[in-house]
Amino acid sequence: MAGIADFLDSLIGGFDLICFALMIGGLLWGLFVLRPWQQANTPAILAATTIRLIYQGGFWLAAAQGFKIILKIWLMAAILEKSPFPEFADTSQFIGGLIRAALTLLVAAYAYYYLSRHPDSEDHWQNTGLLAVPMVVSGAWLVHAAGRFDDRLLLMGLTVLHQLAAAAWIGGVFMLLNLWQLQRRQAVAAELWPLLLKRFSLFGGLAVGGILLSGVPIAWQYIDSWNGLVGTGYGNLLMVKIILLGLALTFAWLNRTAVADFLLSGNQHALRRRVPYYIEAEALILVTLLFTAASLASQPPAIDIPNLTAAWQEVLGTFTPQWPQTTSPTHSALLAGEAGRVAIVGQTPSLAATEWSNYNHNISGIFITAMGLLAMFSYSRWAHSHPLLALSRYWPIGFVGLGIFLFFRSDAETWPLGPIGFWESTFNNGEVLQHRIATLLVLVLGIFELMARRAKNADSALPLVFPVLAAFGGLMLLTHSHIGFQAKSAFLIQVGHTTMGIFALILACGRWLELKLDSPGKELAGFVSVAALFQIGFILMFYREPLY
């Protein structure tokens, strides 16, 4: 069961940050953007749903914090084979976690019992904000900085500011989505949409400024060299965060441009036909960014592992094009080397295991590259000129074949090919569990997308399954569990996975926008989506695993 605990631990951190953004970001939205006590015409349903999201986020955050403590106890008991108490009870993770959960419950309870009954009361909004201050500050004892000796208080303060600014932006985006849903149902006045978008543009800009002003000095303290940035898990995930931030800011800029155009011309077309879907894509990227941030928090800072840092040449070498491996070692050769490869004492690298993995990745890359080429061809004018060429739109069938291939080839030391049983391998190894989920994801993705392309109902929700599953796949690649104080070989494996995770997210956002936007934006988004798929295949086709 340790495998499940390890996998859940990598996910609960991201869920914790989402709830924090929903609660604190929603509260800041109400205080500085919505300001219901100043607006006599603020719809009651808008204030009510905003407050509901705040206290629901708070209750879920408290539950997540408690679950994180339980998971840590579970993991330590599984590893140590005994109870971690009473020693664990004296740690900042245990004490700080309980205090934070209690303070979160206090804020959520006040919002539920008082703020929800007086949604237009400035005093109750301010009281909720004041109650949230110690809860936000309490998070400082649960971050990397709390365990450091140098500049401890400064780093703790900067981390709290970083979390607060991120929550303000991301929580505000969640509130915009809530506003749009009410707008679609005509539950709020039409003029509120451009008004609150304009207000949030300034508020969101200040929040992004806070993220950068706090994030840069934190990164400077934790990464002391160029190799630390490009050659460690911490540095790699930080670069992923920067890329995701850039993607999210691109959509934020498109939204701001649409608002500015509306203020100048009064034209609401972009404001209503594009901006809501840009915000949905921005939210998807920001949620992924939160899970990446949670994964980053589980990594040792680069400055602490100078002897486990890969050179930039080694990192670049993982992406060097080379002839794919199209022959596989035998299954018996793989099993013969497993005992030495996983030995705690006297570990012996297994060439067969490395070549088996290379073959799996390279063949998968050939599958996906071919699918990407077919998918890009399906957007050309020639694809509609002949019935046979029109079949290129059914390129997702490749996912079904890939899923079957991975079912037999992934983790071949386990069921169905290996001697280790299905339940034992799945629940005792977090990496195997994630591989099994990924295999199922690929298979289901292909089946549902084929069903969507054959569906006659134009209003079917089936096409939305593809971007949702693709986004989840990208999330898994970005949060793929690795050894904490990892060897360079494990890090070099991580680099390829995180790069593919970014392209998987672009694939998901592009497909989502293709389904939502009007022309010509939908065609552009669709082509970018399948181009990202092609790039994933390209990375996989030249994948080479370090000998370990």
Image: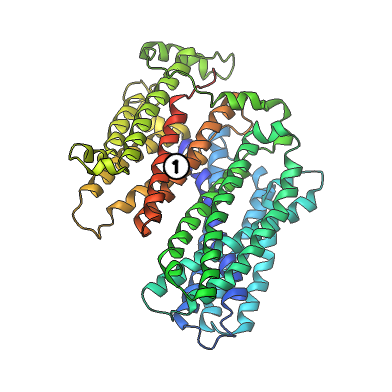
Q: Is residue 16 visible?
A: no
Mark 1 = which residue? 504
Single out the residue that lies furthest toward the right.
150
Note whether 417 is above or below 66 in the view shown. above
At x 56%, y 82%, the residue is 36
Note whether 287 is above or below 201 in the view shown. above
Identify which residue, 33 or 345, lies in the foreground.
33
At x 70%, y 31%, the residue is 227
Identify which residue, 259 or 432, lies in the foreground.
259
| Residue 150 located left or right of residue 28 | right
Disc 1 marks a residue whose amino acid type is Ala
Q: Is residue 200 visible?
A: yes
* Residue 42 placement (x, y as % from top left): 50, 83
* Residue 330 placement (x, y as % from top left): 36, 12
Secondary structure category for the residue under label 1 = helix
Note whether 306 is above or below 22 in the view shown. above
At x 50%, y 22%, the residue is 544
